[in-house]
Structure formats: structure tokens, C-alpha cells
Amino acid sequence: MGEKNTPLLAVLQLLRKYNLKGTEDILRKEASLGDVEFENLDLPEVELASILTSHHTESDPYSYEFAYDNLKKFIENSLDVYKYELSTLLYPVFVHMYLALILYDHNEHASNFFEKFGAEQEDYCQEDLMRLAAVKTKDQIKGNELAEIYSTNKFVVQLSRDASSQLKRFLQEQKSSTVIINIINNHIQVEVHDGPGRTQAQVRATAGGMLGEATRNENRTKVYYGLLKEPDIQVLPAPVEDEEEVEETPDKPKKKKAKKEHIFMKKPKSDPNAPPNERIPLPELKETDKIEKGKALREASKRIQLGPDSLPSICFYTLLNSGHTAICTDICDDSTLLAVGFSNSSIKVWTLTPVKLRGMKSAEKLQDIDREAGDVLVRMMEEKDRDTCRTLFGHSGPVYKVMFDPFKTMLLSCSEDSTVRLWSLQCWTCLVVFRGHVWSVWDVRWSPHGHYFVTAGHDRTARLWATDHHQPLRIFSGHLSDVDCVQFHPNSNYVATGSSDRTVRVWDCLTGTQVRIMTGHKSTIFTLAFSVCGRWLASGGNGELIVWDISTGSPAALIPPTHTAPIHALAFSRDGTILSSGSLDCNIILWDFNAITEEANGEEAGTTNNTTVQKEDKFLLRSFATKNSPIKGLHFTRRNLLLAVGSYEGSS
Amino acid sequence: MGDSEFAYGSSMSVDSMKVIAESIGIASLGDDAAKELADDVTFRLKVIVQDSLKFMHHSKRQKLSTTDIDHALRVKNIECQYGFIQPDSLPFRFASGGGRELHFVEEKEVDLTEILYAPPPKIPLDVSVRAHWLSVDGVQPTVPENPPPLSKEAQKLESVDPISKLSKPTNKDAAGKPMCGKAARLKASESVHVKQLATHELSVEQQLYYKEITEACVGSDEGRRAEALQSLACDPGLHEMLPRMCTFISEGVKVNVVQNNLALLIYLMRMVKALLDNQSLYLEKYLHELIPSVSTCIVSRQLCLRPEMDNHWALRDFAARLMAQICKTFNTSTNNLQTRVTRLFARALQCPSQTNNETGVGPSMVTTMKESEKTPLASLYGAVQGLAELGPEVIKVFILPRVRWLGERVEGALSGLGGADRLAAGNLKHQLLKVLAPVVRQLRQPPDLPDEYKRDYGYLGPSLQHAVGKIRTSPPHVSHLSHVTHTPKTVDTIASRSMVISASPAPQSPAPSTPPPQKFVIVSQQKAPQTQPASGAGHIVVHSSQPTIVRSQNVQSVVVTSGPASGAAPAQKVVVVGVQPPHHHAPPAPALVSQAPVSVVAKPVFARGGTPQQPPELDDLSHLA
């Protein structure tokens, strides 16, 4: 088939698409095209568009540079009020001009154009530009993930009303060259918002998403960020007291009761923002789970109040001889077990208390046990083999995340081998293999109430599972790149995901829809954490840390980047006053979370505080360096002691 | 953004394609085909590397490894590249020739039998967990598991750029005490940021530590001393005590050089050595105290009671090595440390004729001439040693032109009557031959004629010729080593030198018996270097790269006795610098840092002042004795 015929074929395909039979027949006759060629009409959309527009004036490669220069000059000369908003246009226009040049086969011009203007794009775009720069010919656009995303989606730019009218006026002046007008029409979605133009800081705060900013409309849905009413706490004190603290003084229980009541009092009777308890069906608590909950509550009553004046103590667990092999860690809720996932596909579980790890008895021996006995749970465990460390084998690729369930009986792990495994901590064997993800699974998290869990992977989806189904209950898709991290909301109704497309999204577990999309990160997001109250979401990327307000979907406060390497661990203290972040730069930083939320609330109320100068040390309480041990996990115990895990990487 | 621009365009070259094609048997790959291939390969490689970065990030690493690439290939449904298991990095070798540059993986042939019969390698240690307190109530305890409170980089930054400390909030890092309670409230209420005075309070534990360490370092128990020095050399978190330690050393040297207490000077130098060796300390701020002390121990006219008997040469050698180490570590373009030190030593070697040539006739010249005319031989020895440690280039420029004059001094002293002078001259000669021979060997062409040497180098010419000849004939690997005069191995001389310390009050020394008991040192040489035969000298030159070996042949021992001493100060302990900082002299304020090295050069009085017995600074110290 000759080159000449390609445009004709494209036209034919178009006619066929719109079902214009008559015209199609006439054209075929006139061009004397046989049926053979007709069969091969399956040009991809992108190419079709490029072929059909190639007879346009746009194919003049020189007009692009000129047009981009013009746009730049217009933006530079516009008033400061509009300048920063308008400057967000530059990047998408640049990208689409480059792609257009390549589509029209002006490869030389394209790379010249790239060299000339690539370096002056915002620094956070550079990573994408590097990936885009690999695309040098038309064929490669098809193979490139990023180029495809750009050509099939619209880039969102938010402008104030005045700025957008300025832009319109400029575009009207540009009648002679339609390049920019076409790009803005076809590939850029201009969102007009009321109110004054934003400042540079404001624009920067939300810029950075792969496809520009989040539109306001997307964040309109109401999110029930309040906590669930804890049901049966009142029942608990009875089974709790007889457990282990018999040796303590007899007046102890009384005290405890008083304190506990105090804790109950603090809980609001009914949170207007809380979802109904039955919104998501939660499993009934088992007797053992109740005991566990009771323990948690009793521990919580001994909690130390943290604040800027009383910082937590940090106990650091160093993994020796692990080098680069230790990948992920988790400490169970009552801080007695530590699990570590390794790059050699194994998982190790250590006990952090003198209590040894025990396996269950064999099936024959289990039959002999009286099932009605009160201590059946103790009896069924093996007496002999006790260990401080147990290893779980099963995966066939690096284990990227391990997590204990809230009741300390099960462990979830996810791996490069695209599976998620559920392990029993009583038999020390794998119970279920969950298959569903196509490529590696980056993250897995239990719901705070157990039963449900959510995974995220390289296939750009996050999936919600229940332990009793072998298939996912929900698939959350919409991210434009890998979903790198995931986190359950404390009320189990929502799931937050962070992705390489530099957005954080919140999904409703009930409907499976996206309820929040938040932009502002300038790099891949590696970890997420919900605040204790459920309203705030902290996300850590490559050195940057952002706290979001779930109620509005906007960043709550600008935290100046202090870490110099990816943040892989975030933890809120149990009373929600301190946020700790751990990074690969071997530093743990404690942030004053009260100050952060106060600032956010203050901004809401409209009090403009001019303390931006002191921002550097406004939130940062303290940073602790470790000895060449990158932080891989952080955990606050119920009494607010901070546990950190890192692997020592030698003294070089 | 030069970097990124470069990176945008980076691509595989057409040449590489051709080389790869050749290696798999395609002899003639067309230019166009190669170009096409190169573009395609570049694109694919970039995509794979981009994907493998994801795997790197999720493995919580900051270094890409071969396994990441394997995983990325798996995602693309490409078979992994087997056989690249390299823990650190791929051993790419570089070769160029014929206008082409090549990077290739060197594949060594592995002998299987060797592997089969070799003992099995050790089983790698299993991963284990170890807990420690990173912070207790917001304060980071200084335990070995935690990093030193102030990193070496931070110390360096502080000494190079003191302003950086002011601009940064000081209370945020983990070191020091947290702001709480009243202090925090004060800070919140007062907006004026008052610059904090440099705090030098030591905690009680630190005071105890300081006391213990300093006592052990200068005490008589060699075991404890070794422990103390080990602690100084290894412990992190000593930086808070550094000002005091350095003052201790510098005051100690001042006092003991006056009293000619060789042993204590050696101990103090060992302390300097330990501090220099400590990986967590950055000493630049304290060089203004250390350098005068060290240079005193190198060039001082007299370091011991009986120069004819005691081995103060070892101290000079050791201190010279320390000085070289200091120069190497701390020399920067701003402090010009090495230049200054070199100038200091070179001035001591200034021979009258040269000053004549350089400065012309003037009153200052006369004094210089007189001064250098009477520079004691011991100081000359120190200066030569100090320069020699700085490297062959320095020897060539500063010592070699003065050989003739030095030779005259040596000749004069050897033919003279004074026993001490003869010994010193012998040592100086020996030292000169040792350091000069390798340099001369490099400079001159093989036919070594005694006459020429005599003409060029004066009195020392013939011996030098002999020494050079000896080097030339010795095996090549030894001669190769010989011009590396400052191998790190030699630094431990003093530490490994045998020291006999006896507590018996009646030494064999003919010391005048004065009633107040005092610790002092008698250093006796069992074999005087002078008595060495000519062949022995040649032997030494051959091994000049290893002065330790050479020196240990003539067994030297330092005998420390506590007993009657010479009629010096009547106090029991000579060196005591209180825990309270002697703030009226030498305050270790950061402001002094910039001028500090200047004062080093300005005070060579220590070494060759007219009356080293009574330096004026000592008046302040009288209460310390």
C-alpha cells in the first residue's frame, strides 16, 4: 500500500465511523480502492487525527516556536495577578507542541524545540520531560505511556475569570496562527473559578499533577470523614481485668474505671460527619477480638499526652545484616510483633516482647483438646517449639508490604509476583493467595476493623477485597500511572490512594467512585496516613510532605520540604498531636500536627496570618538522625511511644 | 539546567551499535541501519530504565540494582538478563584505542577446580533485630548506636562558615536540650532573636570523662593510657570537649617544653594523634592551638634533659608525621596551611648565603644570619624531618638547595668537641641522607660520580653518592617504595616503640638529686646511631620507606621513672589544665578561627627564640603547675 493512500484510508475510516455509506462508496470508486485495503482500516485514533490534520497550516514546523514564544511573552507581560495562573498553561502547550511536531514527522524540529524550551519548564515537570524526551518518532508515541496519557486526556488548568478573559483576548489576537488555539481547544481544559487570581505560592501548592490541577467539581461530593461510633465498649471492662494484671494493687481497677469514663466522655455523642455505622457492613467482633480491644483501651488510658513540650521517646529497631534486602516492615497494633518483608521473597516475624512465637498443634493433637475449655486458645498452641523469629516462605518476588490485621491473628503481604497472600500467625502458614492484579502489587492495607483490605499495584488500579472472597469487591481505576500506596480511612468507608501521576485520590468503598482528587505533589507519592480524627490525610513523596483536608480536598498547610530523600513512613501519635515522618535520608522528623491543623482552620476562617517567614520552624518540632539506617517503618504504641524500624547499611 | 539538557539528548552512539554488531558476527552494518538501531535501542533502554526506577523506589533503595532491571523486563514480558548478580556495581572496564572508546564487562576465566577445592565461604550472617533508644523524651542519647551529635560535615561547615550556624535554628537538631517549659515560652513571647553565646558547659559526666581521660593520658599507667587514647580516637560526640582538650594539649606542651619533660610531650603528641584519628571530629577550629604545639615538638631547641642521652629524635619524627597528617587533612586554598607550615620549617633551614642573595644587605639580614647561624642542630633536624614528611617535592625545593650549608654545619659539629652536638650532627646527617637519596636518585642520571656529588652537595656529597648508588642497585620494588616516604604505616612509631616504665625511684641516671619528687623521663639509647658502620647506613637507605623497621634495629627504649628529678618546678604533676576553661588566655571562641593559623606562623619563637627557657606566656600558667 503506497504512502499516498494513507490519508485516503483515514478519510474512509472516518466516513465509516460516522456511517456515511454513500460518500464512502463514491470515494472508493473515485480513488479506485479495492476491498482489500478497506479491510485494513484500523488506524489508531491518534494517528487518524494526525493524518487528517496534516493538510492543515499547523504542519509548518516554524510556526510552533514562534507561537510558543508569543505565548510566553504574553504571559510574562501580563499583570502579576494573572501571571502565575497563566504560566501553568506553558507546560501543557509545550508538551502538545512537541507531540504535534513529532506527529507531523518534524523530528529534527521537535528535538530542537525540546532542547530550547525544555529546560525552562518548572522543575517538577522535568522528570516527566525526561520520560517524554525518549519519544523521538511517531511510532514511539504509541509505546510511550506518558505520551498516550497526554494525547488521550485533557490537561486541566484553573484560571480566574479575569485571567481567562485575558487569555481569550490574546487568542483572538493570534488569528494568524492557529497552533495555540487548536492545542488549547483540543487538549487543555480551562477551569474558570470565581475570585481573584492566585499568588505564586497558591498556584504552586496545587500544581504538579500529571494532568494539571484537580477541578473543583470533582471534589464536591460529601465525604463522611467522621469516626464510627464504637459499639460495645461498655461490655468490655469485665473480661479485661482478670487477664494479666492480677499482681497489681487492688485499687488499680477503680482508677482505671474513672479514667476510662473520661475517655468515653471525650467522644462526641454523634459526629455529624460520621457515616452511619451500617453504611459498610462490618464483621461481628469475636470474643477474642473483644479482649484485644479491651486491652487496647486499657493501654490507651495509660497514654502519655504528647505535644511540642513533651516529645515522645523513640525506640529504634535496627535490622542488622540486612543491607538492602529488607524492604517493608510493620508492627502490630499492640506493638508485640514485628514483620519484615525481604527482597528474597521471604517474610520474617519477630516478637518484640519476651513472649515467644508459638505454632499450633498438629491436627491429631488438636482433636484431643476439649473445645469447651476456657483456655482452649492457649491449649491449642504447641508448647515445645518456641521462637523469637519465624520465617514465612511463599512469595516468588520481593515483598513490598506486610501488614498485621488489627487482631494480631493474620498477616497480609503483597509482592512483585502480583499476588497478595494471607498468612495465619497461629499455624504460620499461608491461608489464601489472592490473585487479581496483573503486575506487581505495591501496597496492601487492612481495614481498621479487619475483614476488608485494599491493594494497589503497577496495573494502575487499587482493589478492595474481603478475606472471604477470592475476587476483589471493588476495583478503583482512574489513576494515570502506578498506584504506589493506599490507606484505609479510620472509619473503613473510604480508601485513599497515592500514585505516580502525582495525585492523591479518595474512593468510596460503598459505591466504588472517586470522591476526592488532590494535586500538589511534585513527585511520586510513597506513603499515606490518615489522622486519628479522620479529617486529615498526610502524604509523603520524594522529600515532600503534604497534609490534606479531606472535607474540602485542598492542602491544609504548606510544609516546607525538610527530608532530602523519599519519605516511606508516616505515623500519627495516638492522640493525634504529633505527626512523625521517616525517610530514606536516615532522619525521623516530628511535626506539630496541632499547629498544622490550626493553620488550616485559621485559613478557612479567613485570618491571614503573616507569619510565613517563620514557617521553616513553625511545624517542625525536632529531627532525629539515625546511624546510616534508612527508616522503613514508624509506629506509635498505644501509650504513645514511637517505634521506628530501619536497616543498617554499613558504615560507608 | 545543563544537566537535564545533556540528559534529554543522551543516546546510544552509532559506533556502539557497530561494535555490538561486530561482536555478534555482523561485520558490516550500514550507517543508516546503525542509526535506526541506535535510536530504537535508546528508546527501549530508556523505557526500561524508567520502569526499573519504580522497582527501586518500592524496594526503598536509592540505588538502582540489576534486579530492578530484571523486574522491569518482566513487566514488559521480556526474559530477564541472567548472570548479573553484582552486589555493588557492575565492573565495567574502559578501554580506548584507534580513536574508539569502549566500555565492556570484564569476564574473568574462573578456574572450577579452584572453587571446588577452596574451603566453602562463610555463611552470611542472618538478619537480626537490635533495639536502642533513638530519643528519650525528645533528647537523643549519645550512645554508639546513634550518630554523633554533630556530624563531621556540620563541624566542618561551622568552622569554614560560622555564619551558617546563626542563620539556622539551633534548637531543632537532635543535639542539645529540647526547648521546653519556660525557655519555650520565652522564645514564643520574645520576637527578638538573641544570638546565643557559645555554650561550653560540660555535663557532670563529661567533666568526669575529661578528668579521667586527661589523667590517664599523662599518667604513668601505660594500660590506662592506651585505653584513654583508644577512647579519644574512637568515641563519637567528643566535639563538645574539644576546646578543652586542645587547650590541655597546648598548655601542656608549653609547660613541658620548658621543663624538658620528654615523656609528657610524647604523651601529649599521642593525644593529638588520637584526636586526629577520630572519625567524628573535625579539628580545624582548634588548629591554632595544635599546630604551635606540634611544631614546638618538632623544632624546639631542647626537648629533654640530656640531649646527648635521650631519644628526643623519635618525638621529633612523630610530631613531624602528625604535622604532615594535619597538613594533608586540613589544607585548603583559604588557610594555606601547608604553605605556612612549609615556610615555618624552611625559615629554620635558611642558610646565611641565601638570605644574602634574597634580601640584600640590611640590619634585619644581620640578625637573621646570626640567628640561623646558631640554629641548633636539633632544630635543624626537626625542620628537615618536618619538610621531609611533606613529600618529595618539598624535599627537592627546600632541602636540596641547602644541602651544602647543612653539610657544613654537620661537618663543623662532627669535628667539634661537644658530645651532644656530635650526636645531633650524626642524626642530622643520617636523616638528610635518608630523605635526600630517593629524591636525588630521581633527579640525576645514573653515572654517579663522587666528584660531581662533592661539587654539587659539598661535604655530604660522597655519602649521598654512596646512598644513591645503594638505592639504584637494590631491587626495583624497594626503590619504588622508597620515595613514598610518608606511608601511613609509619605513623604508629611511637605507639609501637617499646617503653619501659619503672616506678623504682632509683634510676641509673646521674640526675642531680633534688628533694621534691616528680615524674620525669630518662631516655637512654642503648646504641648510638653514630656508631653505625657505613654499610649499615646504606642498608638503612634501602629501607627508607619503612622507618619503623630501621629504627627498631637500634633498640630504643624510653624509661620512665618516678623519682628524683632535676631542679625544676617543685609541683607533683606538671600538666594540669583545670576543667574550668582558662578563659583569660586562649579562649576558643569561633571568632578567633580565621586568625588562628596566622598566629601559628607568627610564633616560631617557641622553636628558636633566644631564651626558650622563659617564654613570656608561662607567667599565666604558673598557677596551673
Image (cartoon, rainbow, N blue to C red):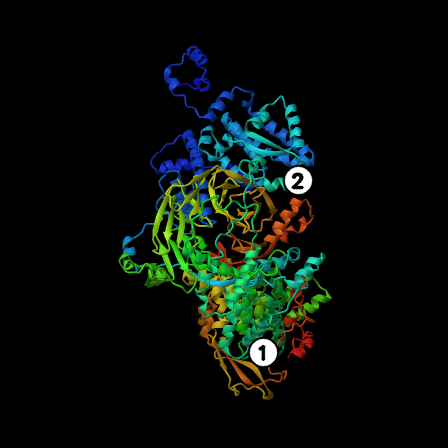
Q: Quadrant of the N terminus of chain A?
A: top left
Residue A322 appears in the rendering: no
Mark 1 vs mark 2: in front: 2
Q: For numbered disc 2, what is the local secondary structure? A: loop
Residue A93 appears in the rendering: yes
Residue at left offset 48%, top offset 74%: B497
Q: Nearer the viewer, residue A187 or B610?
A: A187
Q: In the image, B177: left or right of B483?
A: right
Identify which amino acid the numbered label 1 is placed on: Asn
Q: Residues within 10 Å of mark 1 (few under 14, many from 20)?
A: many
Q: In the image, A48: left or right of A266?
A: left
- Relative image position of residue A185 (x, y in whole percent): 57, 26
The span from disc 1 to disc 2 (Cα, nearest Å) is 72 Å
To which quarter of the image does residue A171 belong? Answer: top right
Q: Nearer the viewer, residue A32 or A373?
A: A373
To which quarter of the image does residue A647 belong? Answer: bottom left
Q: For numbered disc 1, what is the local secondary structure? A: loop
Determine which residue is flagged by label 2.
Answer: A199
Q: Nearer the viewer, residue B154 or B98?
A: B154
- Relative image position of residue B379 (x, y in whole percent): 59, 71
Determine which residue is flagged by label 1.
Answer: B261
Chain under callout 1? B
To which quarter of the image does residue B292 belong? Answer: bottom right
- Relative image position of residue A612 (x, y in whole percent): 67, 48
